[in-house]
Image (cartoon, helix red, strand yellow):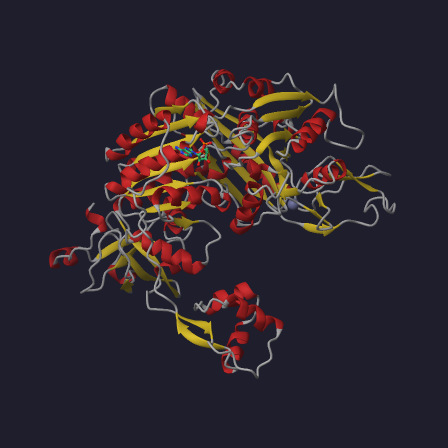
Amino acid sequence: GAANTRGPVTAQAVAATTRVRVLLPLPLGAAYDYRVPSGMAVAPGCFVVVPLGGREVAGVVWDGAADPALQDARLRDIRGVLDAPPMTETLRRFVDWVAAYTLSPPGAVLRMAMSTPSALEARAPQAGWRSTAARPEGPRITPPRARVLALLADGAPRAGGEIAREAGVAPAVLRGMADAGLLEPALLPRPAHFTRPDAAHPGPVLGAEQDNAAAALRLAAGRRAFGVTLLTGVTGSGKTEVYFEAIAATLAQGRQALVLLPEIALSTQWLDRFAARFGAAPALWHSELTSRTRRETWRAVAEGEAPVLVGARSALFLPFPDLGLIVVDEEHETAFKQEEGVVYHARDMAVVRARLCSAACVLASATPSLESSVNAQTGRYAALHLPARHGGAALPSVSLVDMRATPPERGRFISPPLVQAVTDTLARGEQAMLFLNRRGYAPMTLCRSCGHRLRCPNCTAWLVEHRAARRLQCHHCGHVEGIPEACPECGTPHSTVPIGPGVERVLEEASAIWPDARRLVMASDTIPGPAAAAAAAKSIQDRAVDLVIGTQIVAKGWHFPHLTLVGVVDADLGLAGGDLRAAERTFQLLHQVAGRAGREERPGRVLLQSFAPEHPVMQALVADDLEAFMAAEADARRPGHWPPFGRLAALIVSAEEERAADRIARDLGLAAPGGDGVEVLGPAPAPLAILRGRHRRRLLLKTRRDIAVQPLLEAWLAKVSVPGNVRVQVDVDPVGF
Ligand code: ADP
Ligand code: ZN
């Protein structure tokens, strides 16, 4: 559109626009009015610097007229216009839309779209350090200095702040090293231009089913019009290769493509496949980028230099000048929901952004959400399905181990049938995986003498023992403490015992049963980042590992050719509690884990250890009947107007003082909206009644689908005055409750 070109602004336009609205990336309210000094040309979308209180803040000239009632003398001048491509009109409308839908201040949403205000810093080449070519003899190489030199061993210059952070040294160390002749100043290279992925690069030859689906996606992406396609297919059917063709079609048109992945740090295999198809790596966007890379990537996207970007949910707010395609892979994943700050679901907002940009949107999953399935059934979304695994591999056979009939030995967690299956698999020289979605050694610690359970001081949660790290940890607030020598309640020494298993405990048991098997634990604390994930994947692919033990990170998209057995230690784990989507999520997770088995020539086998083998989720997994399961879920939710057949929003009231939280929750309950098709549930304690020291209460607003919740919420919140020590967080379309 016109908004992304920076044509000359006519004198007339300048004269007419003497005051404008500027939106600032702060959780304030709406835009503020500023005066445009004579001679300065600004238009909506321009990045400008304005005074705010005693400081200067970068913001964006927003749409709409400034308030004519404000006296000129009360307005302050825009200080300057920043050298950055203006924010496109579609992105501005997207910011407004997300703010209105989630009931967030527009400035809080803009903050995500500006990434960090520093993304706009001037582009002058930065000064950095590199190691001197010939190291002088004299200076002493202390351990901190050695760490710096190791970082700079490749001779490339790096920014001082980055070196100091990564080597864990004070900036003064760098200056001292420069004085000693070990380092020299050097200009950092200009931001890397992203290599253009080549749509014509020869990729793998698609199978017939893949080819049909790819043709449909090429058409959808070539239309330059909004449309959503739900791409489903059994695990290993090659959905990724299919949506790569939609990316190719988008590139051929000169537009940009965005791919959202739920766990970008674990996506090394995905990146290899992208490179194999397009001959180049895509640009990346996730929380672990250094601030410099963030700045450069933000710039490259704004300037159209990053044709394909792969990112976590926040990538949705990047300034693409002409976005033609958004792919949301594993669209059912809850990782797409942001729970802090602006509470939004990236899958749903991807559809909105695609609509605003006239782009195609592809939602891919082997186990789609009920929301997306229903949209496909009713024809709002197009649907494509890949019915078979690529290369003709068979789907794994899934069977149940009834833990009541064949229980493990006392104090153990792996039942005799599963022990046997792993033993057989290892004997055949194949790989096995044990899955338990729980980090640490034991989820609860109990005093044998008085029954006291060790609880987090800040949350309604048990402390989880991490035996390898010799500590207790809260998985909700991060609280850490040592394992007590004596019970903190009754004082009995050495009386605490672990209750239940975590992956560390399964590892301990596996080590006793299969001492010769080479074991690898994959959990977020043992696989902290992309490098570790890549190394783990490689050791499994190279058959340097026989037995993989892992949490939900092993369920994600991996392709391990030699893995033929998956054992689920506690298949019932996700079913407890009153969560609306507990069954759906358990089915999705276990189906994904099961899908890791037997992806090539040798057939795969899956054993689910369960105390409730008759449960519909277990039965659906055994029958591999996704459709029947989803139909049953839909039937269960439809009559009560539960999502996706109705709308839901949650208010979470929290305060350090329990009485304050209770009082506001009660006031909200008394002011609750009502009427035909509108219902309020609660107040009730939130699922974590205490979190990080704050007491939490929850109210749920449930409406029929044809009723918009935002106006109801706004009117509701306006009726209750909330004191400063109480927070009310709005969560439209909550997922975990
Ligand atoms: P899904 O995402 O549907 O579970 P994947 O996209 O992971 O399946 O594909 C499964 C495996 O098959 C991957 O290793 C992928 O590289 C491979 N694959 C898929 N399509 C092809 C193809 N046309 N030619 C060669 N290998 C393919
Ligand atoms: Zn805690």
Question: Toward the viewer: 642 or 198?
Answer: 198
- Report the residue that reaches farthest toward the bottom: 138
| Residue 328 in which image quadrant | top left
Q: How many marks?
A: 0
Left or right position of 597 against 484 = left
| Residue that appears at 74% across and 37% down | 509
Q: Position of residue 194 (x, y in %)?
A: 34, 54
* Quadrant of the rendering where the C terminus is positioned: top right
Question: Toward the viewer: 483 or 71?
Answer: 483
| Residue 36 in which image quadrant | bottom left
Left or right position of 553 against 423 = left
| Residue that appears at 64% across and 29% down | 567
Q: Is residue 626 above or below residue 650?
A: above
Ligand 1: image quarter? top left
| Residue that appears at 39% across and 65% down | 55
Left or right position of 702 against 137 = left
User: Can residue 39 be seen here?
Assistant: yes
Left or right position of 95 against 678 = left
Q: Position of residue 298 (x, y in %)?
A: 36, 54
Q: Position of residue 185 (x, y in %)?
A: 43, 76
- Report the residue that reaches farthest toward the front: 428
User: Can residue 32 be seen here?
Assistant: no
Q: Is residue 416 above or below residue 122?
A: above
* Quadrant of the rendering where the N terminus is positioned: top left
